[in-house]
Amino acid sequence: MSKPQRVDVILCGVGRMGRNHLRVLKESPHFALRAVVDPTLAGTDVSGVRCYGSVDEVPDADYTAAVIATPTESHHAVALALLNKSKNLLVEKPLAVTVDECNDIRDLAAKKGCKVAVAHVERFNPVVRKVLDIIKSDFIGTPIHFSFTRVGGWPESVKDGSNVLIDLAVHDLDILQMLVGPVKIVASVAHDTMKKRVFDTAEILLRSEGGASASIHANWITPTKIRTLRVTGSKGVLVADLILQTATVHGGNLLRRGPEPRITDFAALAEDYRNSDLVEFNVRKEEPLRGQLEAFFHFLQGESTAISVIPEATRAVQLAQEALSRGRSEG
């Protein structure tokens, strides 16, 4: 049987991320957007597509897959409703708020024979792929420490009980496991600075099974959006900007293979610093959301892709839950 050239799909939720999904779905050659579901816009047309108040109002025959971009706390209920209709899913990260909810989705998907992917979109950031390539090439030697910073901007969707670990740090928990494999939480601190019961700042310390350590700093307080990753290796330091999609490696002797310079005074130290090697890697800039949607299409065809699946997404939620629990008690 030939594979379908286009997949009929609906979009649930047209908030901040939903609007981005709407745009790439409309532009994709692989998907035909049949409906939008959002109770605040029910009965209207959104970008020329009919909007319904709930998934129960959309004729089942109109679509085979759905993209869920509703608020995090609703992922579980919306996913179960769609799985009960035997629909394949791409769920915005995190998959759900708790591990138990993730397991509910896993169990129903298995029962219904449905495919579920999770939109950990940084997997499709070309600079993240470049970081993985640089590490595999041994250019910076053995990775010793990974330092993530993901900060900036109080989101409009923050509600009582929201926290920066499940909504923001979960990105870096997923990236870290892509780079080093399974990790464990060593310590965590969380703050509810601006509003009680809304943990808006967190610092997480982790260790991989291979021995590398990592720190993740996430907050909604910093007024400027920053998304960076620094990898300290035995031969050099890799610095990646996930927004600008740049990757540079700094090291004293990456390219020149002569003897170490003799440092005799501050002037010699400054000269050595100026002459230290800096290698800027070429990164072909792409919109991660487009790459993710294409991977979802191929995932639905049964092809192997880098897209996050339920076990990986559940592990990220589990780590975020544990970090929040520790952060509350230690903070």
Image: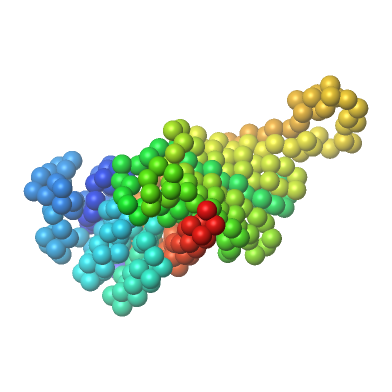
Q: Residue at x 70, y 36 (%)?
A: 250
In what quadrant of the picture does the N terminus appear? bottom left
Spot the residue most to the left.
Answer: 43
Residue lying at the far bottom of the rendered structure: 111
Would residue 29 be visible to someone looking at this image?
Answer: no
Q: Taking 179 as reference, is 78 left or right? A: left
Q: Residue at x 49, y 43 (%)?
A: 150
Percent from the top left, x then y, of residue 199? 43, 50
220 on left or right of 21: right
- Please determine whether, in this image, residue 271 is positioned above or below residue 244: above
Between 299 and 181, the one nearer to me in the picture: 181
- Is residue 315 in view from this perspective? yes
Instruction: Tell me residue 15's x, y (percent).
Output: 26, 45
Position of residue 151 relative to residue 73, above or below, is: above
Image location (x, y in percent) of residue 5:
29, 56
Where in the figure is residue 208, as x and y percent of width and height?
63, 61
Q: Residue at x 57, y 40 (%)?
A: 240
